[in-house]
Image (cartoon, rainbow, N blue to C red):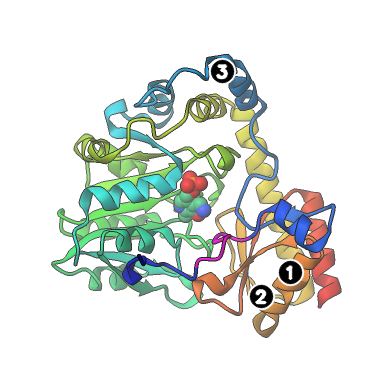
Amino acid sequence: LRVSPRRVLADMTPYTAGKPIWEVQREYGLDRVVKLASNENPLGPSPKALEAIQSLLPDLHRYPDERAFGLLRALSERLRLPEECLIVTNGGDELITLLSEAYLEPGDEVVVPSPTFSEYAFGARLMNATPVPVPLREGYRFSTDDLLAAVTERTKLVYLCTPNNPTGTYLPGPEMRRLLDSLPRRVLVVIDSAYAHFATAPDYDDGMAYVREGRPVVVLQTFSKIYGLAGIRVGYGAAPAEIVRSLLQVKEPFNVNALAQAAAAAALADDAHLEASRRVNEEGRKQLYDGLTALGIPYIESMSNFILAEPGERAAGMFEALMAKGVILRSGKGWNLPRHVRISVGTREENKLLLSELAAFM
Ligand code: PMP
């Protein structure tokens, strides 16, 4: 038995998203490994999330709430959206799968800017639909005209990742409005604002207002990034109620475990941790900009918690050399960007270590 070649996204090494810390420790015989590869929160989860997990442990013989009502209620208040417009998923990744399962037929087209988060194309192929890549312009800027030009009769979904992974660029609010106003209503626009909380530009738009307006959009967000809960797998979608109902029709009942639901609800209530995480990211981003500039490594300004740097010819060597020194970055190769590496913003100390290893390599 073979996997249908159309569905295979990439050559499947055991670690499709890069090596975890313990694997690098084992392989290189290192004690100290710093991971700046997966856009995680370097401060870790909110202590309130950890307390919530602790207090739920005696109840682990119970199945979780199918609809995650406790978390749903908290999200509803926070986002000023009715509960029927929200769905909680096993990470944002599951929402992408649910969208594919609910809406895609073989031969349908899914418009995806390029480069972007790889799960959108993966989700399309899962249902034998066709991802239609739309290259970003100079400086990895989005072009609304290019996206519109890619839409055909067969287009079902348009994905917009803003801030975009891996470039850190974003689609300005007025351009997002123009895009939504110009698309036929039968096309569903998925606005992936997983990194929204890090964006600082005044014209940044996370897309939530369009859900409130009842437009055909789904906004994806997650507890994996600023909320520091990537390991427990919880994300959510916001969309008009009719769309949420379709997604619930294809969802498995116990998709989000009980600890994840409790941790996420507690994390959502911890504004102090959110603010501290934002501050550490902004300071770290500046520290990395300054360090990269001093080393003569070009980079793209980022609205997120990672930076796409362009060391050029030396990118592959840099990635390997830093790994051997215990600093894990994300290679650009997965996005067909062999001259780039993506660097997640760490704590002050982690960034400092990265910059000193970079200086030694250069
Ligand atoms: N969207 C984007 C743009 C991402 O970068 C990620 C995580 N890499 C996700 C969604 C999904 O994250 P998770 O499944 O951990 O919620």
- The answer to whether residue 75 is magenta is no
Query: From mark 3 to mark 2, how far is it between C-alphas?
Result: 47 Å
Identify the residue at image location x=67%, y=37%.
276
In this picture, is 352 found above or below 308? above
Looking at the picture, how far across and down is residue 348, in whole percent?
Answer: 78, 50
Identify the residue at image location x=63%, y=36%.
275
Looking at the picture, how far across and down is residue 75, in whole percent?
Answer: 42, 28
Looking at the picture, how far across and down is residue 187, in whole percent?
Answer: 20, 56
> Sequence order check: which comes first, mark 1 or mark 2?
1
Identify the residue at image location x=23%, y=47%.
102
Q: Quadrant of residue 352?
A: bottom right
| Residue interval drawn in magenta | 12-18
Residue type at tag 2: Pro
Label 1: few (<14), some (14–19) or many (≥20) C-alpha neighbours in 10 Å:
some
Q: In this rendered view, identify the residue nearer to me: 203 or 196.
A: 196
Per the image, the residue denoted by label 3 is: 56
Residue type at tag 1: Leu
- Image quadrant where one finds the N terminus: bottom left
Q: Is residue 6 visible?
A: yes
Q: Is residue 201 visible?
A: no
Per the image, the residue denoted by label 1 is: 292
Seen as rendered, the residue at the extreme front is: 1
Q: Secondary structure at mark 1?
A: helix
Identify the residue at image location x=39%, y=22%.
65
- Image quadrant where one finds the C terminus: bottom right
Q: Nearer the viewer, mark 3 or mark 2?
A: 3
> Sequence order check: which comes first, mark 3 or mark 2?
3
Per the image, the residue denoted by label 2 is: 298
In this picture, is 39 found above or below 275? below
Q: Secondary structure at mark 3?
A: helix
Residue type at tag 3: Leu
